[in-house]
Image (tube, grey):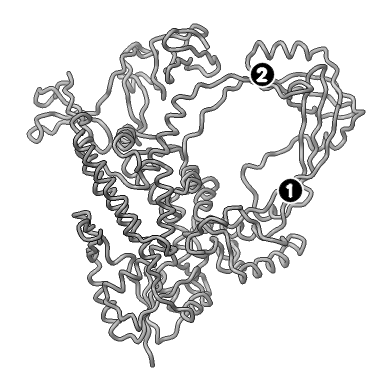
Amino acid sequence: MARYLVIVESPAKVKTIKKFLGSNYVVMASNGHVRDLPKSQMGVDVEHDYEPKYITIRGKGEILAALRKEVKKADKVYLATDPDREGEAISWHLCQALKLDPKKTYRISFNEITKNAVKASLKNAREIDTDLVDAQQARRVLDRVVGYKISPLLWAKVKRGLSAGRVQSVALRIIADREEEIDAFIPEEYWSLEANLKVKGEKKLLKAKFYGTEKQKMTIHSKGELDRIVKELEDATYAVEEIRKGERVKKAPVPFTTSTLQQEASKVLNFATSKTMRIAQQLYEGIDIKGNGTVGLITYLRTDSTRISDEADVNVRTYIADQYGAEYVSEGNTQTGKENRSIQDAHEAIRPTDVSRTPAAMKDSLTRDQYRLYQLIWKRFVASRMEAARYETTSVKIAAGDYRFTVAASRVAFEGFRCVYTESEEEKEENNVLLKNLDRNSQLSRESFDSKQHFTQPPAHYTEAALVKTLEELGIGRPSTYAPTISTIIARRYVAKENKNLYLTEIGEVVNNIMKQSFPSIVDVNFTANMEGLLDGVAEGKVNWKTIIENFYPDIEEAVAKAEEEQEKVKIEDEVTDVVCDQCGRNMVIKYGPHGRFLACPGFPECRNTKPYLEKVGVACPLCGKEVVIRKTKKGRKYYGCEDNPDCEFMSWQKPSEKKCPKCGSYMVEKGNKLLCSDEKCGYVENKENGKSI
């Protein structure tokens, strides 16, 4: 009997795939990559056509030895690594490391780990796609060149423990740019006004929002403006001027891609991107389902396609018709409008491998987190093949003298996909019943006014979900890179994550400034997006991968050489302070570490005393009069606090000023060239230079 060897990446897949194949198939795992560039050097031979110097990864010797033993016994070897560029590269590395005979080696790939998909892949075995391998090699070499050329420079300039990366440095810059926008933002005051109207014959009051005049919409900018409008409205007659009825259609969502899954899991389940990918990997590789053995529950998790297979499409439409009725099955496919751009390896969207495996049926076999993520994927997939939700809308315009108020409401006419999947952002309507009975002859009388003061809000801090969305929109990175990129900048402490938000830390600010100053092209969004386009060109066989490296390497070498020449100008020297070391009496110096600045004794290594560095900002604490210093949260985010903390509880995210607010007496804070009152309800703003109010 012939003997066949199937090599997969993960041991978890071995168990799942073994049961689909006969006894003459041996399934073994490579445990991911078996070869890589060495850690001790850049590993790229610049003198010889930028050839990578691959070595066997430490600890993989035993795995390779076991694989070689089975290769000798096998009549055919099937390489079944993941169906993407990295998986293709792992198969190629296995060929090199195991010295596989091309005549008896085949590449197979499947988008889902099911019996049909695995058996179909064996019938469609092919050669390794060297274009995909080269695209992955190009990415790896580019990332290695950036990391190994720039990181030593950062070590020289900012002491130690830092690193640069081709995609991570751009992600850091995106966050830093948003922080600058937030810091420079000056809030503007505005007011909302609602009229509570009594409709004759109705007990409930009708809430109408102020719109403006008959001709145009108005924004109420101040209390004085509000008071003037309210005074004019007090004696006005209120009457229904116009009623418009219509229909609004909300299309079903498309199935998940890697990016949208990460975003939705963050919003709905509060999962970090890395957690989403880890759990999705478990669902893809196989879960032990009672009565069925190990089963792969979802398709491959790294994709930017919303396409699904014809078979899956037929199955889900049949399921919807059986469970909800034929009227709920959509006629066409929901599209995002992004299908014309390059889709990674023509994958499918992320979907359940079998729609009849409902979340409820799987619940007992899954952990809580696995169940919640599977339920999200299953519901989104089913919803994607359902009819749109339809709403009946009513909008009313109410005349009040020269001014106009509006009321709007909607009611669900047909639930469509909403009976399976609903967005968390949907607004509740309160006026449905009242508007149903309203017509042009309804008599209205004003009962009261409700007014509220508001201030315009700065752009929101990035969350992991928002950053993934931005990286995808800008064409930076690929589905497989989003989670590791975010994990890296958090692990390096360039960015702190607090309550879902990502904040730039002091050390992140230093690194970003150096990257912008010395390597502007590396952190340029357009340059990085263009590089992704070139890598796609390699995968499609249109671009030679070494040409990309040849064009890139001299530029970065020149930039590094230039930065090294100017290094003395920007090098951070140890600054001597007036803080005396309480162990040896020397004056302590300011040092830079992986987590920012700290005080250290210059007598190291004889004296190893260190202290936190508290930089004074030259302002007295508004609460107790002692010095205000720059402090950091546990995660590295900068804020201003009292030196007498914890006895004094003063803290501010913005730098406080000595000046008091002339309007309410609160302390003021600096924002760019403006001073703002720290009390948001006050809203006083003035120019820092001339002290004139704005």
Q: Position of residue 563 (x, y in %)?
A: 23, 37
Q: Is residue 207 left or right of residue 139?
A: right
Q: Residues within 10 Å of mark 2 (few under 14, many from 20)?
A: some
Can you say whether 6 is above or below 454 in the image?
below
Q: Residue at x 90, y 25 (%)?
A: 443
Residue 71 lies in quadrant: bottom left
Q: Amino acid at mark 1?
A: Val
Residue 556 has which mark?
none
Label drawn at residue 249: 1
Between residues 540 and 220, which one lies in front from this camera angle? Answer: 540
Q: Position of residue 598 (x, y in %)?
A: 23, 30
Residue 220 circle label: 2
Labels 2 and 1 touching (C-beta < 8 A): no
The x and y percentages for residue 615 are: 27, 22
Instruction: Left or right? Give the position of 353 relative to 508.
Output: right
Specify whether residue 246 is in view.
Answer: yes
The amino acid marked with disc number 2 is Ile
Q: Crowding at label 1, few (<14), some or many (≥20) Cα neighbours within 10 Å? A: some
